[in-house]
């Protein structure tokens, strides 16, 4: 077997080990309470399916412009204008099959071997893998619970070197659910370094109106998509908004590696942005209620959820008093309580001693799952 | 602007320059005869749309297994078994959003910086871009018209070095329409080098039954999809079949960079393979008739099509007697005759002096376009 160094060293998702073990238990007839996944259980808002079907029936079945249907890019630009008050040239948008390929575009276009990207720790595991697989090096900005996981600007400045090619910001964040403050966004905008702003959890901000990095800087790279707030995971639809002078190079990469995103899926996305934005408020309230329910139930069983997430749909809970080894603990809880979670170590060294609980699951399952967890903890 | 070396050096598609100029002329009200594109005009066989719609209605809208629905992978394995008599483990299949991302998987997993891939010249432009963008170096096997563009095995052997990590074979080929002989396939199988077999033009072989590289070697990497023979370009559906010991690494790359392919598009692909294979014969005959029509019309106007393609849907015609500069000539013909073609130089140094005519266009357009070209040639 001849594998490249990058392929040999790409890290596994520990979450997948848990998922596979959970599937095995499920296959043996056990009911599993799955708080491990980042896939919303809520079906996408009404009308999106029909818009997709309509586009298929209308024969919208060919390659589109490599950057996406211009009508769809206009709608995305209008959405950013209406929601954030920013002017976007639709020619600066590239529609992708989910946000993951957008990360390939951005990181592969920016990074030479050995170039550095500043990444908060804990981080979303794929982010580190994108950077390293494409030849870059992640420099970690360690976040502390006692600082409410806020970015320390002095510490951040001390990490910047001549090799720093980008800073990756995800707000609301995964696994923490933190939200970047306006002062942090303004600070980042004034650094002379490209900011990659992952806005995939926009629409799931429980405390205030979402803010796009584009409100603070025109030189950033925004990545967003339809999987989280609209729950359109399987559709595989995302986009990136990039500074104008990068468009030619990005279009060439897109043409070669992806040709274009699916046209009828783009029609579904167009419908979502033009008709279903009001639904996002309703969905957000459902997630918020679940968040509060889960925080309450975890607290009742003695697990202090010290940091209350402001966005996304995860709780990141210190479980070091039960077992400081999060990998071991996640398997104990899975095997004994049939509760699936994601071990904190999956999100980097600063995540150890924690478990991530996703509340993208209905209230009934949350209640039953939390009871099972409570009973397990009583016995330990 | 900070762009990586790979992003700065990725080559443009010259075909896109022509396409954009053609679109401009079209916008000015001129009728354009488009023989430039590799996108079949024929709609996909009946029932595929409905299968896709049915899957949407049934709520098949979530992430699938990262390698694709196991039921769909079973169908792909059965298709390869029925069509080629080979046994494929469905676990060795990874379903992708079109074949382009499959090339990313394969080349990124095999190539370290400076590693070599042997590529025929003329080649499909993306193939060179995939290799170079992912850090590899293409070593060209030059093909000669006087040898019917066949691969010279001695010459091939002389190109193999310690750095050779793969040989890329596309059969039927683009832009030539050549088909690899069984003896070539057997020869390649016995080299101790991974063969990447691009089988995207299978189903469009006018002379014999398609042969998969898998009939000759279990150690190859097959890439195939639904865009050409089934005409499902916009669906974005492809797959790769890889040797068993590569699966773990490939799955990790797939999970990180793509998560999974679209579930309802997979349902459409499953329907295509289970219900529409007989349609491929009918479609092939349509293309074959067009091929013969176009060869006839080009010959009538004094352009000798010396190599008659055996597969795919392109004619690669020596036009050096009109103008040896294919880029210039393609623009002359576009501007004066409103006939869009692809300049041979887009396919590498060995393509210069040629134009590629796609016959993925209906007979009426072929006739009218060829008349326009004839009138242009009379005046030159």
Image (cartoon, coloured by chain):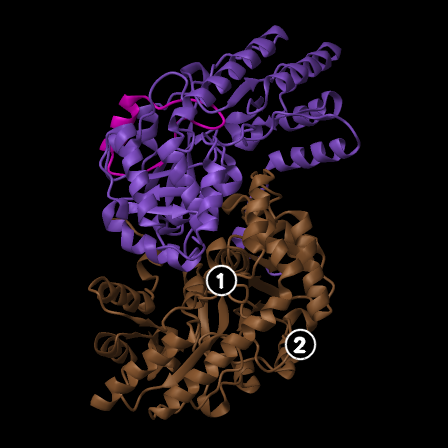
Chain colours: A brown, B purple
Q: Secondary structure at mark 2?
A: helix
Residue B255: name its quadrant: bottom left
Q: CA distance from mark 2 to mark 1?
A: 40 Å
On the question of residue A265 being in view, the answer is: yes
Q: Nearer the viewer, residue A47 or A255?
A: A47
Q: Chain of mark 1?
A: A
Confirm or deny contact between disc 2 and disc 1 (CB under 8 A).
no
Q: What x and y, as percent, mark residue A79?
A: 68, 62
Magenta range is: B169-198
* Pointer 1 residue: A43
If you read the primary sequence from the N terminus, does the residue marked by circle 2 or circle 1 appear first?
A: 1
**Magenta-drawn stretch contains A125:** no
Q: What x and y, as percent, mark residue B207?
A: 38, 16
Q: Say which residue appears at 54% left-offset and 27% top-offset.
A: B42
Q: Nearer the viewer, residue A329 or B107?
A: A329
Compared with B337, A51 (above or below) is below
Q: Nearer the viewer, residue B18 or B212?
A: B212
Compared with B244, A227 (above or below) is below
User: Which numbered tag is attached to residue A100?
Assistant: none
Q: Is residue A329 left or right of residue B311?
A: left
Compared with A158, A166 (above or below) is above
**Magenta-drawn stretch contains B181:** yes
* Pointer 2 residue: A190
Q: Say which residue appears at 54% left-offset and 63% top-offset.
A: A230
Residue lying furthest right: B28
């Amino acid at each position: 077997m001849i594998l490249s160094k990058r392929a040999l060293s790409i890290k596994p998702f520990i979450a997948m080990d848990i998922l596979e073990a959970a599937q095995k238990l499920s296959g043996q007839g056990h009911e599993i309470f799955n708080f491990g996944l980042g896939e919303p259980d809520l079906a996408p808002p009404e009308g999106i399916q029909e818009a997709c079907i309509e586009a298929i029936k209308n024969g919208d079945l060919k390659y589109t412009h490599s950057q996406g249907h211009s009508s769809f890019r206009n709608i995305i630009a209008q959405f950013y204008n209406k929601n954030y008050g920013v002017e976007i040239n639709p020619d600066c948008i590239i529609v992708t099959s989910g946000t993951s390929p957008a990360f390939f575009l951005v990181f592969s276009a920016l990074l030479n071997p050995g170039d550095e990207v500043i990444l908060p720790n804990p981080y979303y595991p794929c982010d580190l893998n994108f950077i390293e697989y494409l030849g870059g090096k992640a420099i970690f900005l360690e976040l502390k619970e006692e600082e409410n996981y806020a970015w320390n600007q002095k510490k951040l400045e001390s990490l910047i070197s001549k090799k720093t090619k980008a800073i990756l910001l995800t707000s609301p964040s995964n696994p923490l659910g933190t939200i970047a403050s306006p002062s942090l966004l303004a600070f980042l905008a004034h650094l002379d370094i490209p900011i990659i702003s992952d806005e995939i959890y926009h629409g799931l901000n429980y405390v205030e109106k979402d803010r796009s990095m584009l409100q603070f800087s025109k030189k950033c790279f925004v990545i967003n998509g339809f999987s989280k707030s609209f729950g359109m995971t399987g559709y595989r639809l995302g986009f990136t908004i990039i500074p104008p002078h990068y468009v030619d190079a990005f279009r060439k990469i897109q043409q070669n590696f992806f040709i274009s995103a699916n046209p009828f899926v783009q029609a579904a996305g167009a419908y979502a942005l033009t008709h279903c934005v009001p639904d996002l408020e309703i969905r957000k309230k459902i997630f918020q209620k679940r968040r509060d329910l889960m925080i309450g139930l975890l607290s009742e069983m003695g697990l202090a959820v010290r940091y209350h997430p402001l966005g996304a749909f995860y709780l990141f809970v210190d479980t070091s008093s039960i077992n400081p080894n999060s990998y071991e603990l996640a398997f104990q809880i899975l095997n004994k309580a049939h509760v699936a979670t994601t071990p904190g170590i999956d999100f980097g060294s600063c995540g150890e001693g924690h478990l991530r609980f996703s509340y993208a699951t209905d209230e009934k399952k949350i209640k039953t799952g939390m009871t099972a967890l409570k009973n397990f903890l009583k016995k330990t």
